[in-house]
Image (cartoon, grey):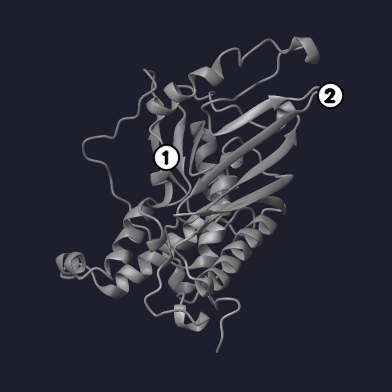
Amino acid sequence: MSVRESFNPESYELDKGFRLTRFTELKGTGCKVPQDVLQKLLESLQENHFQEDEQFLGAVMPRLGIGMDTCVIPLRHGGLSLVQTTDYIYPIVDDPYMMGRIACANVLSDLYAMGVTECDNMLMLLGISNKMTDRERDKVMPLIIQGFKDAAEEAGTSVTGGQTVLNPWIVLGGVATTVCQPNEFIMPDNAVPGDVLVLTKPLGTQVAVAVHQWLDIPEKWNKIKLVVTQEDVELAYQEAMMNMARLNRTGGLLICLPREQAARFCAEIKSPKYGEGHQAWIIGIVEKGNRTARIIDKPRIIEVAPQVATQNVNPTPGATS
C-alpha cells in the first residue's frame, strides 16, 4: 500500500475545517469497557457456556467464547470450527478512506492473532453521525466504505452485508468469519518460559495522531512547537496511519515465539521476497509468573525511521480537481 496525499476536504467540496475526528468524543479504541467491568457484565452469558461438546462432536475440541476477542465454536459437522470476531472503533484519523481501511484491519486483526490468515466473509457495521450535513454524509461515508472494502479485498475476502444506523457519533466496525480445521488456528495460551515477544509494528500511534490533532488547537500546539516541527508531526501522522491500515497477517501486533524461531521470523518478515518488507523487533521474554506484564526500569528506546518518505504517493480516489 503506497502513501497517499493528505486528505483535503475542499477537494470534496467540504468546508476547509472539516475533521472526521470531530464526530466523536472518544478516540479509536477509547470505546472499550475495562476488562474487569466487562467480565462482570457478561457473567450471566458465561453460565453453562462451556458445556461438554461430545454430544454432537464425539470429542472435545478447542473452544473460546464470552469475554475473548475471538470466538472459536466447534461446528456440528465435519470436525470444523467457526472462528469469528467483531470489533469497532471511533474515528482516529481525518482521512475517511484510510479510516475505512483502518477499521477493516482492526476487525481482521483478531482473526490474525489466532493464526488464521484466511477470512471467509466480512460484514460491515456503520454508524453515521446524525450531526453530519447531507453533503458531509454523501461525500465522506462512501470513502469510508470504499476503504473498508479495499482492505477486505487485500485480505482475500469480501464484504457481503452488515448494518448501517444513525448515531450521535461515527462508529466503524464489522464482523469477520472463517471456518477452520483444528490445525488451522492457534489457541492463545501456549506461551512457555523462555519464549520471546516480537513486535510487528512500532508503538506510538496514539501519540502521533493525538499530536496531529493538536495542530488545530493553538493552546496545545503552542506548548510543544518548540520541541517538534509541523513537518515532523505530519510525517509521524502519515507513518502511524499507514501502520494502522496495514494488515496484521503475520499474527498480530505482538507475537510470542520460541527464541530460536523469532530471529528467523524477524528476518523473513523484513524480506520483500519472503515476507512483507517491514521490520519486527524482539522486545521481551516470557518468564514464569502470575500472568502479568512488567516493563524494565530502563527500557531501550528504538527509533524507527519513517517509511512514508521513501514511498510513492497514491492520490486520494475520487477527489475533484
The three-letter amino acid code for the residue at tag 1 is: Lys
| Residue 16, label in figure | none
The single residue placed furthest to the bottom in the displayed view is 321
Could you tell me how far apart the alpha carbons at marks 2 and 1 are, in whole angstroms?
35 Å
* Residue 282 percent across, percent down from the top left: 42, 41
Q: Is residue 305 visible?
A: no
- Residue at 71%, 33% (x, y): give it: 184
185 vs 136: above or below: above
| 273 with respect to 139 (left or right) | right
Residue designated by label 2? 77
Q: Quadrant of the N terminus?
A: bottom right
Q: Is residue 286 visible?
A: yes
Mark 1, secondary structure of its residue? loop
Q: How many marks?
A: 2
**Rendered image quadrant of residue 56:** top right
Dot 2 alpha-carbon crowd within 10 angstroms: few under 14, some 14 to 19, many 20 or more: few
| 81 with respect to 105 (left or right) | right
61 vs 14: above or below: above
- Residue at 45%, 51% (x, y): give it: 201
The three-letter amino acid code for the residue at tag 2 is: His
Residue nearer the viewer, 311 or 166: 166
Q: Nearer the viewer, mark 2 or mark 1?
A: 1
The single residue placed furthest to the right in the displayed view is 78
* Residue 288 percent across, percent down from the top left: 39, 18
Report if the CB atoms under discs 2 and 1 are less than 8 Å apart.
no
Residue designated by label 1? 32
